[in-house]
Amino acid sequence: MGFPKDFLWGGATAANQCEGAWNEDGRGPALTDVTTGGSVKESRQVTYIDKDGNHCRMVTSEGQVQLPEGAHFACLDECLYPNHDGIDFYHHYKEDIKMFAEMGYKTFRMSISWSRLYPNGDEEQPNQKGIEFYRNVFKELRKYGIEPLVTIWHFDTPLYLIEKYGGWSNRKLIEFFDRYARTCFEEFKGLVKYWLTFNEINNTIMGLGLFYEAKEEDYQRAYQHLHHQFVASAHAVKMGHEIDPENMIGCMICGITSYPATCDPKDIIANRHQWEKSIFYCGDVQCFGKYPTYAKRLWDEHQVKLDITEQDLIDLKEGTVDMYTFSYYMSSLVTTHEIKDQVGGNFTTGAKNEYLKYSDWGWAFDPDGLQYYLEMIYDRYQRPLMVVENGLGAFDTVEEDGSIHDSYRIDYYRDHIEAMKKAIDNGVDLRAYTTWGCIDLVSAGTGEMRKRYGFIYVDKHDDGTGTMKRSPKDSFYWYKKVIESNGEDL
Ligand code: P53
């Protein structure tokens, strides 16, 4: 059987990681603009100035940013902020889209920077220059017959909303997001029909107690933050359908397939609970429009008491998504036993799986896990799926003649495409595949450039140097062939 004939092949990016132009044409700062670079060993840090004028840094994540009394976010002279310039997609988009078209892309996933449309986030009227930029990008894509797939929120809440309102744990954020989402649907009507509300919405709870030590109040804040995002997402779905019935709007989940590390029934249950907390919790609310039964257990474990209004419950019901989309990079192991061989990577933890190989950043290479995830999720939700991120972050070497032989990346993709094909043959309704960082960009987790994902190399480096010149890697020509043959010639 193989891939359906109208399958949407393409690539994926996010505004904060590629656009650059962080303070041009009226754009306001986002959290990523006060976040330093890091590495697999050293976490990225958010910088601020405390009430006594001291330069300070904190390790944090979107869900947990809390400034001390009297402090304010700031860029410090002694730090580098890789997202400020990204790969300067803002000024290179025509050239980049031309290269995507050359590969034969049917779709291109990108996100809109909230603070480009609403610099502080709480304005009444949007920034026209921001609207104009995205309109130009969408038109450029359409010129080549490339369908935009647009994420409304990809980790970039305007910084002002975090500083002034405390971010998503404040209910006010729903209102600001509603206004922003309405602007997107109205202004880009007719240009965009595929939308995703919140990128990897589950990250907020997935990492708690796993990648970060978490206190009870962190759980309270994270679950409330998520609840507000669920309601905002539901509003966006409903509004998006009213504005244009053609719109297909999806959730976006960070998909990690977890397995029990042993056949001890205690591990089997622990693994099931891991799926509930990390994966199903968000998908269930966004697809079924209500909290699942096990939610009570998750909340009770940490004495979480949520502020949920009657109207919220109605809104969740009325704003269920049309499709389920997810990222897939790796699998993980869950165990109640002592771990001897620990995975040490960025955002990876737990026991090492002896059957799998790991990337230089500690991410497990597991195409079977993608097939497993696709079949499991399709069975649960029975609605169209899209794999909107998948890829290998790796060191690339530029040869003297400028070529880049990334056979490791081709191998990674080949196996994952085979896995998708198996799931499709088993009945899964998969509509799209957009590989992550189809053009090299700033890593979200580490802020590095050298963790490269692209089919297109970008001459930019971790110390901020580079010409920003684009060049195709071997995988560029390979992927072109894959698309041409609709996934047959691998
Ligand atoms: P980077 C952690 C685990 C899985 C996916 O990640 C993740 C993260 C956060 O780093 O994020 C997604 O750049 C995310 C993208 C991100 C991509 O995966 O850390 O949606 O923004 O760039 C890859 O290698």
Image (spheres, rainbow, N blue to C red):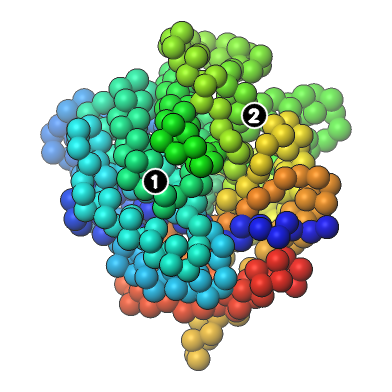
Tell me the tag on residue 189.
1
Q: Quadrant of the C terminus?
A: bottom right
Tell me the tag on residue 280.
2
Label whose residue precedes the other's in the sequence (2 or 1) = 1
Q: Quadrant of the N terminus?
A: bottom right
Residue 262 coordinates in the image, percent (x, y)? 83, 35
Q: Residue furthest right?
A: 263
Tell me the tag on residue 327.
none
Around disc 1, counting alpha carbons within 10 Å, would you say few (fewer than 14), some (14 to 19), or many (20 or more)? some
Quick one: 480 or 330, which is closer to the camera?
480
Around disc 2, counting alpha carbons within 10 Å, would you say few (fewer than 14), some (14 to 19), or many (20 or more)? many
In the image, is residue 273 above or below residue 75? above
Quick one: 275 or 55, which is closer to the camera?
275
Q: Is residue 321 left or right of residue 35?
A: right
Residue 45 coordinates in the image, percent (x, y)? 35, 45
Q: How far apart are the alpha carbons under marks 2 and 1?
A: 31 Å
Q: Name the amino acid type tagged 2.
A: Phe
Q: Name the amino acid type tagged 1.
A: Lys
How many marks overall? 2
Q: Is residue 190 left or right of residue 384?
A: left
Local SS, label 1: loop
Residue 35 coordinates in the image, percent (x, y)? 33, 48
